[in-house]
Each structure stands twice: as C-alpha cells, then as structure tokens.
Amino acid sequence: MYMLSTTKKIAIFITIVIIGSVIGALGSATFPILKGVVPFWPAAAIQALSGVLFGIIGSLAATVFPIISNSMSGNSFELVLLLIPPNLIQSFLPFFVKKIIKISPYELNKKNIIFFVVFCVLIPNILGALWVCNMRFFLENGPLGITKSAVFFSWLKSNVIGGIIFGLLLLKTLVPALKNCGLYDNADEKEN
C-alpha cells in the first residue's frame, strides 16, 4: 500500500486547482450557452479523475477549481456559489464509488474504462445536470423560453463529451507516469 506524503498532497492540491482553474476558465470562455453552461468543458476530465487518482485531496481540489474558474470567467458571485453543489457531486462521487468498488485506475483495461465512463463521468454529471436544471437562477436569468431540459442537456453534453475525451487521454498517458513517479494514492485499494 502506498500513501502520499503531506507535502505531495499539498503540491497535488495546488497543481489540480491551478491547472483545473485555467482549463475550466478557458472552457467557460467558449461561447456560453447560458452563464455557467458552455458547449464543451474539458476540465470535467480533471474533475472526474482527481478523486480517483489522488483520494480525498484530489476531490477537494476538483471542487475548489470550478469556483475559481467560474469566477475568472466573469460569472456573478451568486452563480459561483450556486454551482458549488453540482461540482461537489461531480468531484466526490467518483472518489466514493472507487472506495466502494476498490478499483485501480492504473491499468487501462475494459473494466476500468467502463468504470471511468459510467461512474466518473456519466452518473456524476447526470446528477450535476439535474441539480443545475432545477436552479431557479438559470430559469429566471436565461434566455426567454429556456427550459429545464435545455439546461440539463447542455450541462450534460458539455461535461460528458469533455470528460470522456480528455479523461480517457489522461488515463492512457498521464496515469502510468503518475504511478511511475509515485504520485498516486492507493491507500483504499485491495492488496494483491
């Protein structure tokens, strides 16, 4: 079993927050459908993988960086606060499911790809989209005639497409390097 040192955890937290904030802000700047909802948000991949790869510290960082990226994108303070719960769901659910299933994301195989797509991207973003589409902010401040289903599918499409595309790339390229460098946390995985 390998656990990250406190120094590594702090460095990982800061790195995730900085990279996620920049990628999130750049993604949020691309032709917003609504304030806070864009057609393509690649930072969803970082959000989906952070808790799985780095434990609770990764989930915390993946909850913090959307606050910063939403602020950098010019969203109102009210909207930034309203977007915390769906981002919290999308950051922590993969972490908790990994703890329950006890899966190792460090091998790219069919089981891990299915786990990633279903439990790290689809389900958390469906729950996040359900939260967002029921927020009165979007229905009251969006374009005239905006519907809950339009908000739901816009959020879901932007996060799922970005999350799957970039998440699978990160699983294939970055994850093996993290394991080789000892920058991962497998404290809750099964002993082999």
Image (cartoon, grey):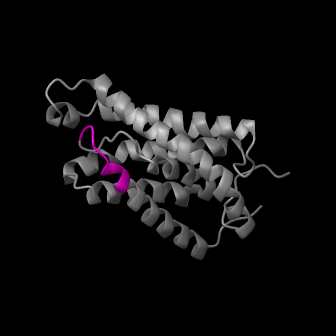
Residue at the outermost bottom position: 7
In the rendered image, the residue lying farthest to the front is 31
* Quarter containing the N terminus: bottom right
> Which SS does the magenta portion mostly show?
loop
**In the shown orientation, is residue 53 left or right of residue 43?**
right
| Count of marks, rendered view | 0
Q: Residue furthest right?
A: 192
Image spot of residue 67 (x, y percent)? 33, 56
- Spot occupied by residue 188 in the image (x, y as percentages of width and height): 70, 53
Q: Is residue 38 magenta?
A: no
In the image, residue 180 above or below residue 159: below
Q: Is residue 191 visible?
A: yes
Q: Is residue 93 visible?
A: no
Is 81 left or right of 27, judged from the image as shown?
Answer: left
> Is 28 situated left or right of 42 in this image?
left
Magenta span includes 27: yes
In this rendering, is residue 98 above or below 191?
Answer: above
Question: In the figure, residue 11 lies in which quadrant?
Answer: bottom right
Foreground residue among 133 and 155: 155
> For the magenta stretch, what is the residue range?
26-34
> Looking at the image, which residue is at 46% across and 55% down?
62
Residue 135 image position (x, y, % from top left): 26, 34
Residue at (20% x, 54% y) in the render: 77
**Residue drawn at (37%, 35%) of the image:** 155
